[in-house]
Image (spheres, grey):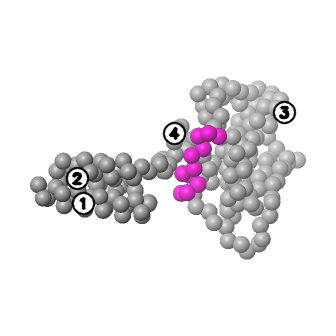
Amino acid sequence: MQLRKIQNLGMKKGKKMEYNFKELRKLDVGSHIEKKNGLSYLSWSWAVDVLLQQDPTAHWEFDEPATFNETMMVKCYVTAFNKTIEMHLPVMDNRNQAIKNPDAVAVNKAMMRCLAKAIACFGIGLYIYSGEDLPSDAVEPLDVDALIAEIKSAKDIPELQATYGKAYSKCTNNQQAVILVKEAVKAKKAELEQK
């Protein structure tokens, strides 16, 4: 017998799914993390919400928990963006030790954690499971005024070049910021060359 939970809000067949792992993995999920004993867990309800916003046809299934001696392992399959991810997770206590003869509440909690981990494999909060506090490609707020102020404070051409390199690397994904930085560098270079 298999336990099944299927969520399918539907999407017209043939409609192209837009999925970009690189973009989904950049999501900062920090305000949706639950912490227990120094470990971080992604809120399963938030993960489901984000997944369904990105792919309304996403659905998931759970197999009957597998028994290993007196402990159990849950298995979840999440299908989204025309791809299925399979995830396993032991039924664990608050110390992350396998529970002997777990009750229904412990099994349910493990199933929901397993669901969140499977969803993370699509990029949503994946960095949590590698122990990082922030996504590796998280987009930091760009303070163009501070970059320009730093450029204007350069005392010579080598310092201007170093400042420009640093500023440019911070704003490569923002074309307007790149233009402003280049204009500030051009003006500062002209000023320094006149000295």
x, y percentage for residue 33?
A: 63, 37
Q: Nearer the viewer, mark 2 or mark 4?
A: 2
Q: Residues within 10 Å of mark 2 (few under 14, many from 20)?
A: many
- Read off the residue under disc 2: 160
x, y percentage for residue 117?
A: 66, 44
Element at label 3: helix
Q: Nearer the viewer, mark 2 or mark 3?
A: 2
Q: Nearer the viewer, mark 3 or mark 1?
A: 1
Element at label 1: helix
Please state which of residues 67 and 78 is positioned toward the viewer in this rendering: 78
Disc with the residue nearer the chain's start (2 vs 1)? 2
Region rendered in magenta: 22-32
- Read off the residue under disc 4: 132
Q: Residues within 10 Å of mark 4 (few under 14, many from 20)?
A: few
Disc with the residue nearer the chain's start (1 vs 4)? 4
Judged left or right of residue 169, residue 132 is right
- Read off the residue under disc 1: 187
